[in-house]
Amino acid sequence: MKQLLITLALVLIALSTLPAQCLTGNCAKGFGIFQYEAGHQYTGEWKEKKRHGFGTFTFANGQIQTGIWEAGQLIEGSTTFPDDSQYIGHYENSLRHGTGTLVYKDGRREHGIYEQDTLVYGILHYRDSSYYHGDTYGPKPMGLGTMYYKDKAHVTGWWTGKKPEIYDAPVDASDPMTDTLEAQTKSFIGSTYNETYAVIVAVEDYPGTGNDLNFTRDDAELFYKFLISPQGGSVPAGNIIYLYDKQATAKNIVAAMDKMYRKAGTKDRAIFYFSGHGVPGAFVSYDSNRMLSHDRVKGAFKRSRAQNKICIADACHAGSIKAFEASAKSTQKEKKEVQLPSFSNMNIKLKSKQRINLHTMKNQFKAFNDRSSNIAVLMSSTAREYSQERQSLGHGLFTYYLVSGMIGNANLNNDKIVDITELFLFVRNNVIEQSNHSQTPILFGKYSRYMPISKIE
């Protein structure tokens, strides 16, 4: 063993002194192994002399990054650190950015939303089985959140590390801290919203294309029923326009959005829900020769004064809404009575070779993706994936878990408010697992990560 360790050490020293060179294969376009001067090594796919595709980068200090690379930068995959802790999730410029999970060697675990290599919102699991849910700065509670202790009541407050500065533990009613907390909490949820104005669109029939769908109408009607329910805000029917098939032309959709969203005031909410096919830059309306461009949807949103604007779509790239062959061949829908799932866990499970192209997905919806927009855009899958339907559910996977989360199953911190981040993590986790890692919902835009989605009565 001692001789083996000496041999390995000599090999590492030799590798660290090698000049930068392609050791084998094609390191310009294809598959190759490249040795860097500092002792790092990359094994994988190349394009235009840059790491591009699936590959593994091994650092001289033992750190390993494996996943999908674009133009030399890791965008999706895993990092195993020298201390054996591991991160799995999204990256930007090879830094942790987006949704991800970090598991420490000592058993601690964190997962949620990362920004520039730092966890800013999510869940921190501790070794004693207690956990924290809320704002974070890396592995520390920082901001509004709730600590769920193993053996005592949970504590909600504004945290700056181990203890909250303002919290909801029992205090004297005359204590000014109580009023401060109530004011902060109201600010946190944005006092929810006054009125909701929604346009719901479903297209199943695409005449002359052979690309008809099976459950888009069922999905849209499920979403409609949610909005008029107490959890959805008991939205009056007069505040919702529902367009289906022949009614769902591009012209009619834009007219409906203008009619509804211009009614909204600054404290109101505007929602657009679309279920149907999609192509880059557009949703495919009934009159597929015209289509509904993302720019037109964004324009209708921008003409509204509503502060909360949400675009939800079971559509992405061409053919993104595609039923399984069994569903496509069925002549009659056979629905089963199913129970909407509860929030079983928040583990984000990813396969190391799963090709999720976050940048490409954003490019498909670039009309929504600028700083002048105030819209949360929640999509059923990435640009390279199909959005799956389940005949056993009578719905698409995405909409099924979307509504399941909104009725309360995504409300992990039990504050009776489901916010956009809670909903996204719930939907994403369940859809990835139920689709066997072949469908990945995505969330982007300019919005508060505490944007309220539903109230739990």
Image (tube, rainbow, N blue to C red):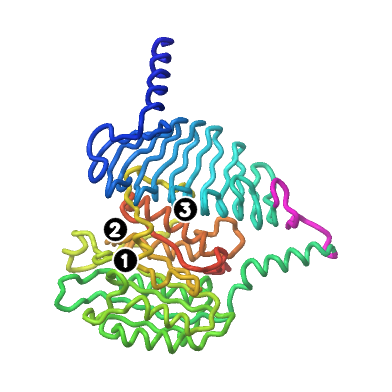
Between residue 39 and residue 187, name the one nearer to us: 39
- Where in the figure is residue 36, as x and y percent of width and height? 37, 35
Q: Is residue 239 visible?
A: yes
Q: Is residue 220 left or right of residue 344?
A: left
Taking the spot 30% from the left edge, 82% from the top edge, the residue there is 248
Numbered range of the magenta stretch: 160-174
Q: Is residue 344 visible?
A: no
Whether residue 226 is situated above or below residue 165 in the rendered picture: below
Q: Is residue 253 magenta?
A: no
Measured Cα–Cα span from mark 2 to mark 3: 18 Å
Taking the spot 23% from the left edge, 79% from the top edge, the residue there is 288
Measured Cα–Cα span from mark 1 to mark 2: 8 Å
Q: Secondary structure at mark 3?
A: strand
Whether residue 191 is situated above or below residue 140 in the rendered picture: below
Q: Earlier in the sequence, mark 1 or mark 3?
A: 3
Mark number, residue 99? 3
- Place residue 175 in its image quadrant: bottom right
Between residue 387 and residue 138, name the one nearer to us: 138
Taking the spot 46% from the left edge, 76% from the top edge, the residue there is 271
Q: Say what amino acid the circle numbered 1 marks.
A: Cys
Q: Say what amino acid the circle numbered 2 marks.
A: Glu
Residue at the disc numbered 1: 316
- Where in the figure is residue 209, as x and y percent of width and height? 16, 74
Q: Earlier in the sequence, mark 2 or mark 3?
A: 3
Q: Is residue 363 left or right of residue 177?
A: left
Mark number, residue 385? 2
